[in-house]
Image: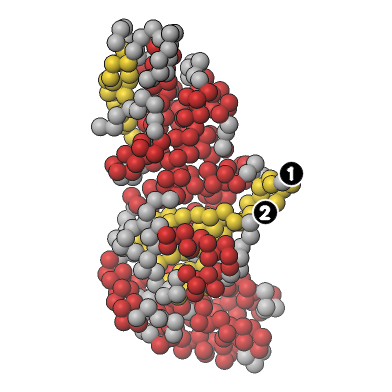
């Protein structure tokens, strides 16, 4: 059972939460937030904050009584402070539990997803009929919420490794130096040793570059990223060089969907249906050898009528067909970034509401919260990849000694 802190030490409290390894971040946040409010209200009744000597003190704390509170995110343990003299149980929690839970959920969502100020948080808490909270009490609540997302973003990664990574970048507008500029949010997801997808991390950069991707990958390595076999992404600026520098044993798979869009730009519009159909046949083959043979046949068929298209496809085959080095069961999951598009749409849905962010910290708060929610969902879903496919991948890595760049030499 989680004890309600008198005056929360964020680091200690967050360590305790992580040690319990609850999969539901929102439930943990709601529980901590309610307990913070109860603690703050008890301080008001006592006439002074917990542990503070004051001539205005009229009562003292005397432990806690625990109550279960049913919420939309699950049952949480509420620690109601006991007083040395008299009773304390707030009406808003006792008589209007449904309204209180909805209001508190709104407070948390608003604080996280819109980056509200301390003053605004005080106003939101006041909607429950709670007033007279000190600035330090309200600030502590806000800091705890931010600490929880920060702790998720900086958590140690699974020591079992992540054979498959998917990386992407989103452009977001932010105010800096009195003007509106664009910055990039770099994202990475991975498949852990148990076959489940995880949100590995995010990084806000001024622009996409070798330096920004390199810094992002270095941060992931510092948190324990290892055992990477294949990284799927669009042809982001600088990402290939960053992979070769930081994760030299990993191969890069160019997203086939984005590559098809690049190919489309080189083909006359009236001829695209035919070229597209030919391109798709490459990915309908039963094994690696057949895939490479079909790719070369498509190049030969395109060369007489579309020599530039044929040359572009031929020089890109190593990047577009890197997935053929992986076991066949995972091909559809790694040959494009399509599986992460739903996540990107959800991030966009949230960020579009904000429009222009006031600072980078607010971007981290919003996107970090979305990633934490998605991470919890993925961990509770069924395996994304089978254990047998991951075992085959591990065998391939040992077989090639980490150097698996010549994909067309391997069979699935």
Seen as rendered, the residue at the extreme left is: 1
Is 180 on the left or on the right of 171, as rendered?
right
Task: Count numbered badges in the picture.
Answer: 2
Residue found farthest to the right: 179
Residue hosting label 2 = 182
x and y, in percent, of residue 148 in the image: 43, 41
Task: Look at the image and tell me whether residue 409 can be seen.
Answer: yes
Residue drawn where x is 35% and y is 52% of the image? 379
Identify the residue at image location x=50%, y=54%.
202
Residue 10 in the image: state x and y as whole percent.
Answer: 41, 36
Give the residue displayed 41% in from the left and 75% down from the top: 249
Residue pictured at 48% horizontal, 63% vertical: 217
Element class at badge 2: strand
Residue 28 place in picture, x, y as percent: 37, 36
Residue that label 1 marks: 178
Asked if residue 332 can be seen in this view, the reply is no
Instruction: Residue 390: name its quadrant.
Output: bottom left
């Amino acid at each position: 059972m989680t004890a309600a802190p008198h005056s929360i030490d964020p680091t200690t409290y967050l360590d305790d939460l992580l040690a319990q390894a609850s999969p539901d971040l929102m439930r943990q946040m709601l529980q901590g937030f309610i307990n913070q409010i109860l603690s703050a209200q008890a301080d008001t009744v006592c006439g002074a904050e917990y542990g503070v000597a004051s001539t205005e003190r009229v009562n003292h704390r005397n432990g806690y009584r625990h109550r279960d509170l049913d919420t939309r995110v699950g049952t949480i343990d509420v620690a109601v402070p006991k007083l040395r003299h008299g009773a304390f149980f707030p009406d808003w929690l006792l008589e209007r539990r449904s309204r209180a839970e909805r209001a508190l959920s709104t407070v948390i969502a608003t604080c996280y997803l819109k980056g509200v100020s301390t003053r605004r948080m005080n106003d939101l808490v006041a909607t429950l009929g709670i007033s007279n909270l000190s600035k330090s009490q309200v600030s502590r609540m806000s800091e705890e919420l931010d600490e929880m997302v920060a702790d998720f973003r900086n958590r140690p990664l699974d020591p079992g490794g992540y054979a498959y990574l998917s990386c992407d970048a989103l452009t977001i507008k932010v105010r800096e130096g009195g003007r509106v500029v664009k910055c990039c949010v770099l994202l990475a997801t991975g498949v852990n040793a148990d076959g489940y997808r995880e949100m590995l991390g995010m990084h806000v950069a001024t622009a996409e570059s070798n330096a920004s991707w390199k810094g992002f990958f270095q941060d992931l390595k510092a948190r324990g990223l290892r055992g990477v076999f294949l990284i799927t992404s669009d042809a982001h600026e600088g990402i290939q060089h960053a992979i070769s520098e930081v994760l030299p044993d990993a191969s890069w798979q160019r997203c086939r969907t984005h590559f098809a869009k690049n190919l489309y730009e080189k083909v006359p519009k009236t001829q695209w249906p035919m070229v597209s159909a030919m391109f798709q046949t490459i990915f309908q083959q039963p094994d690696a050898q057949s895939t490479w043979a079909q790719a070369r046949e498509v190049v030969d068929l395109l060369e007489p009528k579309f020599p530039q298209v044929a040359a572009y496809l031929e020089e890109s085959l190593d990047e577009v067909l890197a997935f053929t080095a992986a076991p066949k069961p995972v091909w559809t999951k790694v040959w494009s970034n399509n599986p992460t598009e739903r996540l990107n749409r959800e991030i966009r849905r949230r960020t579009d509401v904000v429009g222009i962010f006031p600072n980078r910290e607010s971007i981290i708060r919003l996107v970090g919260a979305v990633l934490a929610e998605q991470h919890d969902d993925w961990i509770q879903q069924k395996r994304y990849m089978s254990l047998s496919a991951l075992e085959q991948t591990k065998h391939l890595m040992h077989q090639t000694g980490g150097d698996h760049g010549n994909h067309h030499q391997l069979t699935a």
